[in-house]
């Protein structure tokens, strides 16, 4: 693939990835606001207790094969076909096991209603397995526009269903049916419209060929799922379902934005890095630009959410005010995650799946140990400890993967700290102004307007080159 063609595909991928994630996050925000207003912390808590089982099941069925297929130089139907049938078999086996384990899960948490909730909720990874290979085909071929179309339709349809159920008083079932319908509709659309189709000429040889690479990614993702969701188990066992709901909502709003960033950049970063893996100089340039673009967006949005969190939750549903400190800490947590996500994609493109596993193992051990030690001091202390560890992991990722593209620590500071400083200055000015105001809605509005205006202005004044480069990139579709 030529340089100009790769540039075009990269920028189109970023644009469509941004559109896809932007629209999906807008739908998620609207849905989240409606559900936050209509549901209780206990409703969120019950469904949140099952998150770790869903995460682990999705990881096992995907098997790391999306990345393995993307790293393959040539497209072979039998590779995709083997992954398809393998994923189906794994998902059905896991679902059967979890169906019979549902009473044990309900007994562990002390909530009998979890038996039926679990058996319905676990259908999500069965439907997800039916679209894994179709997603891999779209991902490998950088068909971001097509995937964006299918995902947005599924997100919109499932949101409408969930809102209807919430308004009719179905409580936690609105959350359960939302996730199941999203997976089912998405799989259905990809089965119909994605050019790749499965066949019954099955050979599992490609599975064994990709196993050495994918097994490390699977183990890494499993560790990440356990690390991410261990808090719902600890809280569900040691605290009330309301506490699980508070903690889950605190994580949700920051993770919505992190998902958007990861969706935008991960949709193109690994394919691009893989295609220019033989040109270290080009990889370095692309890597630096991606770090800068992530930093330009992640600092103002995440710190901005933390800044307006109290007013935002107060307006929507004051019953959820206890989640605000968790929300603030996880906004900071997500900054580190977004930045080292680019390092992760770089490492995967170089075939360093073992490195991903090692770092994620270290991260998980530290965060789980921290949670087990600090939970007795309250949810806020838990969130603070895992956030500090996540920033330590950013440094680990930098010194482990940065050397692949000659990206030293001064480069990291140069491409991130200016945007942190500009963001903090804008927030400080907005905070001083709002200290003179009364009224939650007025304060929320003024905070957003002043912070956004000052950030864009200062970004223009302090780094005109990058400011215009970012505008020009989208205007001319160059990177």
Image: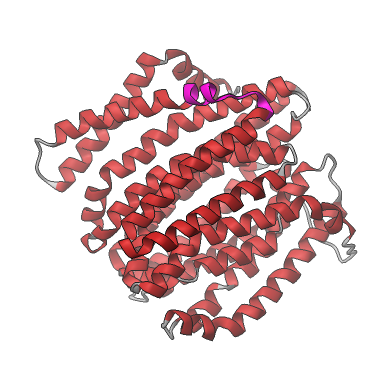
Residue at 32%, 20% in the rendered image: 457
Residue 265 picture quarter: top right
Determine if the magenta segment contains residue 297. no
| Left-right relation of 106 to 429 | right
- Residue segment shown in magenta: 404-415
Name the residue: 38% across, 29% down: 420
Type of secondary structure dominating the magenta stretch: helix
Residue 157 drawn above or below residue 472: below
Left or right: 195, with 443 as reference point: right
- From what the image shows, is residue 419 above or below residue 431? above
* Foreground pick, 238 / 124: 238
Quadrant in which the N terminus is drawn: top right
Assess whether residue 409 is covered by the magenta stretch.
Answer: yes
Can you see residue 425? Answer: yes
Tell me if residue 175 can be seen: no
- Residue 352, horizontal then vertical, whole percent: 72, 42
- Which residue is at 54% across, 50% downward? 363
- Dividing the picture into quadrants, the one containing residue 33 is bottom left
Q: Find residue 145 and report its horizontal and vertical position in percent.
A: 62, 42
Chosen colour scheme: secondary structure
Q: How far from the left and from the top, in percent, is residue 164?
A: 39, 68
| Residue 350 image point, x, y percent | 73, 37
Q: Is residue 142 left or right of residue 116?
A: right
Number of numbered markers: 0
Q: Is residue 268 above or below residue 8?
A: below
Look at the image and tell me in which quarter the C terminus lies.
Answer: top right
Q: Quadrant of residue 153?
A: bottom right
Q: Residue sitting at 54 percent across and 29 percent down?
A: 291
């Amino acid at each position: 693939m030529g340089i100009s063609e790769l540039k075009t595909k990269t920028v189109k991928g970023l644009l469509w990835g941004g559109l896809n994630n932007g629209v999906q996050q807008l739908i998620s925000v609207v849905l989240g606001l409606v559900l936050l207003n209509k549901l209780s912390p206990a409703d969120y808590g019950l469904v949140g207790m099952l998150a770790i089982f869903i995460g682990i099941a999705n990881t096992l069925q995907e098997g790391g094969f999306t990345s393995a297929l993307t790293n393959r130089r040539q497209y072979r139907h039998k590779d995709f076909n083997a992954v398809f049938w393998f994923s189906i078999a794994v998902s059905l086996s896991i679902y059967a096991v979890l169906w019979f384990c549902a009473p044990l899960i309900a007994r562990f948490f002390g909530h009998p209603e979890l038996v039926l909730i679990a058996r319905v909720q676990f259908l999500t990874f069965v439907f997800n397995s039916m679209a894994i290979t179709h997603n891999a085909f779209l991902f490998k071929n950088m068909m971001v526009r097509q995937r964006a179309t299918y995902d947005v339709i599924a997100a919109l349809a499932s949101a409408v269903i969930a809102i209807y159920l919430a308004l009719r008083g179905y409580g936690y079932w609105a959350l359960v049916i939302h996730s199941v319908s999203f997976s089912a509709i998405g799989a259905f659309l990809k089965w119909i419209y994605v050019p790749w189709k499965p066949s019954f000429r099955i050979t599992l040889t490609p599975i064994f060929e990709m196993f050495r690479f994918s097994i490390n990614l699977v183990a890494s993702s499993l560790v990440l799922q356990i690390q991410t969701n261990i808090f719902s188990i600890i809280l569900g066992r040691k605290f009330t379902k309301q506490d699980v709901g508070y903690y889950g909502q605190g994580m949700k709003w920051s993770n919505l934005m992190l998902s958007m960033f990861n969706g935008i950049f991960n949709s193109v970063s690994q394919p691009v890095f893989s295609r220019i893996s033989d040109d270290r100089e080009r990889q370095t340039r692309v890597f630096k630009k991606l770090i800068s673009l992530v930093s330009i967006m992640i600092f103002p949005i995440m710190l901005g959410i933390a800044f307006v969190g109290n007013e935002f939750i107060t307006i929507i549903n004051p019953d959820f005010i206890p989640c605000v400190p968790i929300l603030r800490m996880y906004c900071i947590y997500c900054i580190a995650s977004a930045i080292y996500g680019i390092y992760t994609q770089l490492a995967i493109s170089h075939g360093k799946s073992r490195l991903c596993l090692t770092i994620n193992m270290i991260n998980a051990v530290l965060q789980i140990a921290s949670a087990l030690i600090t939970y007795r001091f309250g949810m806020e202390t838990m969130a603070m400890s895992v956030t500090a560890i996540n920033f330590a992991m950013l440094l680990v990722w930098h010194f482990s993967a940065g050397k692949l593209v000659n990206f030293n620590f001064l480069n990291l500071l140069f491409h991130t700290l200016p945007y942190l400083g500009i963001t903090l200055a804008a927030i400080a000015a907005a905070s001083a102004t709002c200290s003179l105001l009364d009224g939650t809605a007025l304060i929320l509005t003024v905070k957003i307007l002043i912070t956004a205006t000052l950030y864009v202005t200062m970004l223009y004044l302090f780094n005109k080159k990058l400011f215009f480069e970012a505008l020009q990139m989208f205007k001319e579709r160059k990177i």
